[in-house]
Image: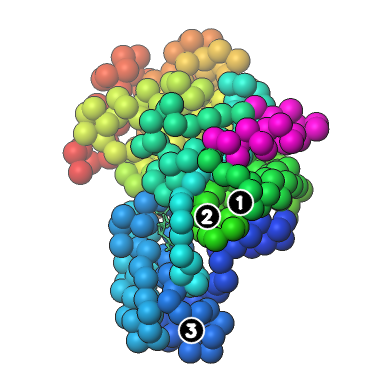
C-alpha cells in the first residue's frame, strides 16, 4: 500500500484535472513566510501538516493565517508538532477559499462487491466513519465503461447540486475516475470537496496506490517510506516480515497462527519485536534466509511456533539449525521452539541434536520465550 501525502495526492489530481486551491509545499517557517510574501500563495491562507494520519483539522494540524507574520508563527507551531506519532516535516500552504458547503466524494475498490465503488455524501468535512450510514450513498461502477452519465447525475442529486456546480461535478468525476483508473489506485478520496461559488474545489486529497500495481508506477517507489530497511529487504525477497517495537522475534506459519502467537506472548507480558510468517514454504534454504533476516533485527529471544502442514516440521528445523550456525556467536540469542504437526518427530530430533528443546504446550512455550527475553519489560 502506497499512501500519498496530501500534496502528492494533489499533484496526481492536478495531472488529471481535478480542480484545486492554489498552493505550495514548505519545509520551514521561513520558507512558508516567503511563499506568501512573494504572492505564490495568496492571503488569507491555510497551513496544513503533511502527515499521513487523518483528523488534522481537529488536531491543530490545520491552521489559518491572514498575514505573513501569522503564517510564519502557524508554520513554526505545526512544524513543531508530533501528530499521532509522526513528526511534521512538510507543510502545504493554500489559499483560503470561501466555502459554501463541504461534501464527501471517493472512489475505492469494494472487495465484497468486487467492483470499484463511487461513494458520495452531502456530509463532508468530517471523517466518513462518523457519518450515519443512511447519509452515505454507494454506487458500484463497471470498470469497463467507467462512470456513466446516469451515475454522475445520481451523485449530483445526492450531493444536492444543480446548475453550475452539477456541471462542475460532471467534469470533476471524469477527472477523478481517470486518476483512479490511470494510477491503479485503491482509493482516491476528496474530503472535503468544497462548493466555492459556481464551482467545486478539492480541499483535501487522500490517494492510495494499489501495491500489486506498484511496478507499473515506478514514480512512487521512493515514497515507500512506511517500511523499515529490513522490511524493504523482506519485501524484495517475498518474505512476510513485520517489525514491531518489542524484543521477541516470532516465527510462525500462516497469518492465523502468527497472530495468535503474538497474542499469547502479549498475554504473558512479552512484546514481539519482529514477526515472520513462513507461510507454506517447504524449502529449508528459504527458512534460513528468513531467519537470518530476523537475526538482523537483533531480538533478545526468538519464539518459533510452527504447525506442520505443507510447511513440514523437519524442513523448518533444518533451515533453522543451519541459520543458527551462520549467526556469529556474539549475536546469538536464545531460541524457544514449539513444533507440532507434519514430521514432528523428525523436526524435534533435528532441533535436539542442535541443543534446542521443543516445548509442546503453547502456554508453557510462550512463557519460556518471555522469560528468555528477560521477562516482563
Ligand atoms: P483532515 O482533517 O486531516 O482531513 O484535513 P482537511 O484537509 O480535510 O482540513 C480540515 C478542515 O479544514 C476542512 O474540513 C475545512 O473545513 C478546513 N479547510 C481546509 N482547507 C480550507 C480552505 O481552503 N478554506 C477554508 N475555509 N477551510 C479549509
Ligand atoms: Mn480531510
> What is the number of the mark on residue 195?
2
CA gap, disc 1 and disc 2: 7 Å
Q: Quick one: label 1, few (<14), some, or many (20+) residues within 10 Å?
A: some
| Viewer-closest of 269 and 70 | 70
Please say if the residues under marks 1 and 2 sit with CB atoms less than 8 Å apart. yes
User: Residue at coordinates 37% horizontally, 56% vertically from top-left?
Assistant: 56
User: Residue at coordinates 44% horizontally, 31% vertically from top-left?
Assistant: 135
Please say if the residues under marks 1 and 3 sit with CB atoms less than 8 Å apart. no
CA gap, disc 1 and disc 3: 29 Å
- Residue 238 lies, in percent from the top left, at 63, 38
Q: Name the residue under label 3.
A: 36
Q: Name the residue under label 1.
A: 165
User: Residue at coordinates 29% horizontally, 39% vertically from top-left?
Assistant: 271
Foreground label between 3 and 2? 2
Q: Which of marks 1 and 3 is nearer the N terminus?
A: 3
Q: Provide the secondary structure element on which disc 3 rests.
A: helix
Amino acid at each position: 500500500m502506497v499512501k500519498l501525502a496530501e500534496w502528492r495526492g494533489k499533484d496526481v489530481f492536478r495531472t488529471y484535472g481535478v480542480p484545486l486551491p492554489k498552493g505550495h509545499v514548505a519545509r520551514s517557517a521561513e520558507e512558508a513566510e516567503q511563499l506568501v510574501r512573494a504572492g505564490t500563495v495568496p492571503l488569507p491562507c491555510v497551513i496544513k501538516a503533511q502527515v499521513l494520519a487523518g483528523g488534522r483539522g481537529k488536531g491543530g494540524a490545520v491552521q489559518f493565517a491572514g498575514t505573513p507574520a501569522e503564517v510564519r508563527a502557524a508554520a513554526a507551531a505545526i512544524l513543531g508538532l508530533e501528530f499521532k506519532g509522526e513528526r511534521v516535516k512538510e507543510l502545504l500552504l493554500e489559499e483560503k477559499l470561501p466555502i459554501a458547503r463541504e461534501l464527501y466524494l471517493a472512489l475505492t475498490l469494494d472487495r465484497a462487491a468486487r467492483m470499484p465503488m463511487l461513494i458520495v455524501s452531502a456530509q463532508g468535512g468530517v471523517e466518513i466513519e462518523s457519518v450515519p450510514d443512511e447519509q452515505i450513498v454507494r454506487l458500484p461502477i463497471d470498470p469497463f465503461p467507467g462512470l456513466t452519465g446516469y451515475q454522475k447525475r445520481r451523485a449530483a442529486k445526492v450531493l444536492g447540486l444543480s446548475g453550475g456546480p452539477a456541471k462542475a461535478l460532471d467534469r470533476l468525476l471524469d477527472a477523478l475516475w481517470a486518476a483512479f483508473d490511470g494510477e491503479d489506485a485503491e482509493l482516491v478520496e476528496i474530503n472535503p470537496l468544497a462548493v466555492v461559488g459556481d464551482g467545486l474545489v478539492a480541499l483535501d486529497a487522500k490517494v492510495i496506490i494499489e501495491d500489486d500495481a506498484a511496478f507499473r508506477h515506478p514514480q512512487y517507489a521512493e515514497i515507500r517510506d512506511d517500511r523499515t530497511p529490513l522490511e524493504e529487504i523482506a519485501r524484495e525477497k517475498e518474505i512476510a516480515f513485520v517489525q514491531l517495537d518489542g524484543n521477541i522475534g516470532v516465527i510462525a506459519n500462516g497469518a492465523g497462527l502468527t497472530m495468535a502467537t503474538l497474542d499469547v506472548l502479549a498475554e504473558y507480558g512479552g512484546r514481539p519485536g519482529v514477526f515472520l510468517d513462513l507461510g507454506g514454504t517447504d524449502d529449508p534454504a528459504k527458512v534460513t534466509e528468513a531467519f537470518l533476516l530476523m537475526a538482523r533485527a537483533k531480538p533478545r529471544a526468538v519464539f518459533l511456533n510452527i504447525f506442520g502442514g505443507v510447511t513440514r516440521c523437519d524442513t523448518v528445523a533444518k533451515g533453522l539449525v543451519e541459520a543458527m550456525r551462520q549467526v556469529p556467536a556474539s549475536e546469538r540469542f536464545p531460541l524457544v521452539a514449539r513444533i507440532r504437526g507434519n514430521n514432528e518427530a523428525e523436526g524435534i530430533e533435528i532441533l535436539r541434536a542442535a541443543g534446542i528443546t521443543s516445548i509442546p504446550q503453547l502456554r508453557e512455550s510462550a512463557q519460556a520465550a518471555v522469560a528468555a527475553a528477560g521477562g516482563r519489560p
